[in-house]
Amino acid sequence: MLFVPIVLVQGQKNNMVPYHSPLGVPMQLSANFGEIRPNHFHMGIDLKTNGKEGIPIYSIADGFVSRVKISPFGYGKAIYIDHPDGRTSVYAHCSEIKGKLGALVREMQQLEQDFEIELFLTEGKVPVERGELIAYSGNTGNSSGPHLHFEIRETKTQTALNPLCHGIDIPDNKKPEITGLKIYSLTKDGYIVPGKSKSFPLQLKGSIYQPYNPEIRLPNDFISHNGGIGFSIQTFDQFSSSGNVCGIFTSTLTIDNKTFLTLKVDSISFDHSRYVNGFKDFLEYKFNHLKYTKLFKNDINPLPVYHSPNNGILKLTPGKKTKIEITCADIRKNQSNVAFDLAVENGKNQPKKDIFPSADYFLPDSAYHLKGKNATFQVSKGTFYEPCLKKYKLDGNVFFGEPSQPMQLPIVVKLFLPKSLKNKEKCYVSVLTNGSNEHALKSFIEGDWLVARSVYCGTFTIKEDRQAPVVRPLNFSLTNNLVSTKQLRWEIIEGETQLADYDIYVNGKWQLLEYESKGSYLEYKVDPKLRGPMEVKIIATDQCGNKVTWKEILSF
Ligand SMILES: [Zn+2]
């Protein structure tokens, strides 16, 4: 019997045809929308492909291909389809693109003599039908195993929508679990007062999660003089059909039985995705690998997921007991609750001191231009999520900020190029974030300065890359007859910066050479028509222009 995947649809208009399943196997989630990731939210859903590549991918509805991008990074081989309902569906990490689109991609790669291409297509160029096979699933780009990363976006704005609220239905009858609670002392602006937070492990009592002591008493000096407190929770959800740990959909904070804040992760724009660093408790994530979602925000946080007139900042009257309840729910409305009483002890009034004096702190709502003889740092307004200590040095050992400090926007770093440096065009700015984490930044020369943009704090130096990439055969030996070989692979190692270009020529003719960045190899799918000895030449160049040529006669 033929397996015809049909998706049940919620929330679609009656006259609309339900979305076809994007995948040729039953849909099982390994990650959901809005999950906390390093420096970004997960902007779609991850669908399992039975641990292998090559599962058919179908267009969920009629429409046309509006964009296709082939890259060794990010989404790998990705297809974007615009639909008449105003939405765009996205299919990422594909192994192979099929049909008319596949032919168009190969044609463009040949024309541009490049594996990495991006095409924006108008309506009529590549129309697709609902349920049409468009590609096979894979593991290309930044993917940690075979799966389909699937997104639904609003076409006009390209804002990512939660697919489970927009036509994709996956059964779920498991309740979210709430495993931790934190309380923070906040300034009136919603910034976390350094060193003033407390963690409370939770236990399930009947059907409600509670701290071990269900009456939390905070010392009077926990609260800043005109500030308040905020909460965060550690929570996760599982779907009925898969054991993977997914993120939560809504959280509601109730104070004395009145709704104080609702968090709903239903749409996120790509411009805001990095704001995950302000959404989560950054330090818990960075140092303890724990995902705490904050139920408060400050004014510079633009994420549209918070619904609260007061940013979730709770003012407490000392001595008065307050009833707190937090409800977490998934899309199918399975929910769990935390409940406890909270009181601040009576005591002396807090001293009225400025917690983040502008002389000592970089403030998120300010811009800075730090100029020295050997280095300058340009910091835009909105770079930081929280105030951070003004730590920097513009001479000698040049550094900026704390190595672990997250940044929303890159800072512009300029380092003076000493006259004595000979190969200026081979220089790049390197940033050392901690003990061993070094990042080579894309850099360019501007007069006497080497300029780069950095989303990392740390120690900045000028380095010179004089080493070409190294290329060596991976799955064949030079003496083999390669007549039945389907693909040839070469290991490629670029020690310092990044690979900028790579090409293969067979008897002088350009052929498609794919770069697999995770596995650090180049792959040539052998043309089955090749016969006899052929000159195979690979030329690879790094970002600083160091070039390697690998050339051999291979027999096919
Ligand atoms: Zn994904």
Image (cartoon, rainbow, N blue to C red):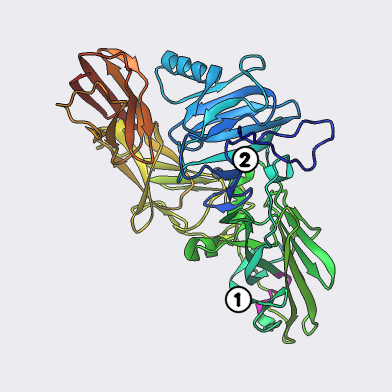
Where is mark 2, residue-wise?
A: 270
Q: Position of residue 368 (x, y in %)?
A: 55, 49
Confirm whether residue 134 shows in the render.
Answer: yes
Q: Position of residue 165 (x, y in %)?
A: 73, 45
Q: Is residue 266 left or right of residue 513?
A: right
At 54% across and 35% down in the image, what residue appears? Answer: 92
Mark 1 surroundings: few (<14), some (14-19) or many (≥20) residues within 10 A? some
Mark 2 surroundings: few (<14), some (14-19) or many (≥20) residues within 10 A? some
Q: Quadrant of the N terminus?
A: top right
Helix, strand or loop for disc 2: helix
Residue 311 lies in quadrant: bottom right
- How far apart, in angstroms, are the residues tagged by discs 2 and 1? 34 Å
Give the residues in magenta: 222-229
Q: Where is residue 461 in the image (x, y as percent from the top left)?
A: 34, 47
Q: Give, as a three-letter code, the residue at label 2.
A: Phe
At 27% across and 30% down in the image, what residue appears? Answer: 546
Q: Is residue 128 above or below residue 354?
A: above
